[in-house]
Image (spheres, grey):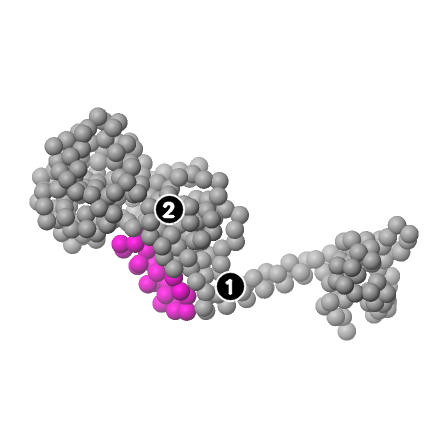
Amino acid sequence: MLQPHVLRHFAEVARSGSLRVTADQHEIAPSALSRQINQLEKFLDTKLFIRSAKGMHLTEVGKELYIYIEENNKNIDGLLQRIEDIDELRHGAVRIASVEGATISFLPDLMARFSEGFPGIRFEVIVGGSNDVADRVGSGDSEIGIAFNCPSRDDLVLRTRIPQPLHLVGHRHHPAVQRNLAAFSDLAGLRLALPTRQFGIRRLIEQALRLHQVEGHIAFESDSLLLIKQIVSQTDMVTCLPEIVFEREVSNNRLSACPITDRLCSAASIDIVTPHGRTLSGAARQFLEILTDAAKEKINRQPAALVPSLG
């Protein structure tokens, strides 16, 4: 009967062309390895190597056996990976870094749906600014990142991009948000409630304010988007946010919003990224598939003019 370790040793001798090199790698005697090869040739009733002073060279039959072993090794590797993935889906973990905006409804809804099918999976979610998200994913501390206008980096792979243009947001009766469109010049004289500068949203707003030479009156700032939404729902302040942050409050008639007509703000997006050159766990790959499918659904519901290219 063919033993797996004998076939493995045969393939390694074929690659190295040397009994001694293979024997040293496996810390076995060259004579023992030679006996294994002789027994294999006796079992198959054919010569597999031509032995010479220059090393071991495969015969035609030996080449066919080597090809067969290599192809089956790939199949075995694939089988082992699938087994590992199944095992991870029973008790693995998904490590995510995300901006706060995606954690309000988008991410929790998907995690709840995923947990119904894979109750043994544990989620580890770290919330931070877009640069923090990029750093965690790039270093491998998190496997999946969800960032606002994620910076382009060599250590990240952009998986998908969801257009998220900024809107002017206020309480449902605020006159500034009752129009169909708002311009950045409309912000002049309004009291603004904005995220702190760790947020990509804030940096984009300040860039647009400078571009349009508008001096914003910042009356309130916080590192909590939830608190900002509460403040604008109860005062005459307004804020600028992507739809993913306020869509639930608009549907509940607690807030109103209108798009801002600005090139920078219209090009804003929520980006899903993974580490470059790293293999994701089986659990992370499965959740990433659900995440990207949900992103595509959001993109398909948006006007074509908002959909950016990944190129």
At horizontal 36% and vertical 38% (from top left) the residue drawn is 308
**Rendered image quadrant of residue 111:** bottom left
Q: Which residue is painted at 14% across and 44% down in the image?
A: 170
Viewer-nearest residue: 205 or 293: 205
**Residue 39 visible here:** yes
Q: Is residue 229 left or right of residue 65?
A: left
- Nearer to us of marks 1 and 2 is 2
User: How many neighbours does mark 1 have within 10 angstroms: few (below 14), some (14-19), or many (20 or more)?
Assistant: some
Query: On the rendered image, what quadrant is the N terminus found in?
Result: bottom right
Compare marks 1 and 2 and give the one earlier in the sequence: 1
Which SS does the magenta portion mostly show?
Answer: helix
Q: Which residue corresponds to mark 2?
A: 132
Q: Is residue 269 visible from the viewing direction of this image?
A: no
Against 61, residue 171 (above or below) is above
Left or right of residue 187, residue 108 in this image: right
Q: Residue at x 46, y 47 (%)?
A: 138
Kind of residue at disc 1: Asp
Q: In the rendered image, which residue does mark 1 sit on? A: 85
Label 2 neighbour load within 10 Å: few <14, some 14-19, many 20+: some
Residue 122 in the magenta stretch? The answer is yes
Q: Position of residue 245 (x, y in %)?
A: 25, 49
- Is 186 on the left-hand or right-hand side of 44? left
Q: Are marks 1 and 2 in contact (CB under 8 Å)?
A: no
Rendered location of residue 211, percent (x, y): 26, 27
Q: At numbered mark 1, what does the secondary structure look like: helix, strand or loop?
A: helix
Image location of residue 21, percent across then percent down: 80, 56
Q: Amino acid at mark 2?
A: Asp
x and y percent of residue 277 in the render? 53, 48
- Residue extending farthest bottom: 1
Disc 2, SS: helix
Q: Which residues are magenta?
A: 102-123
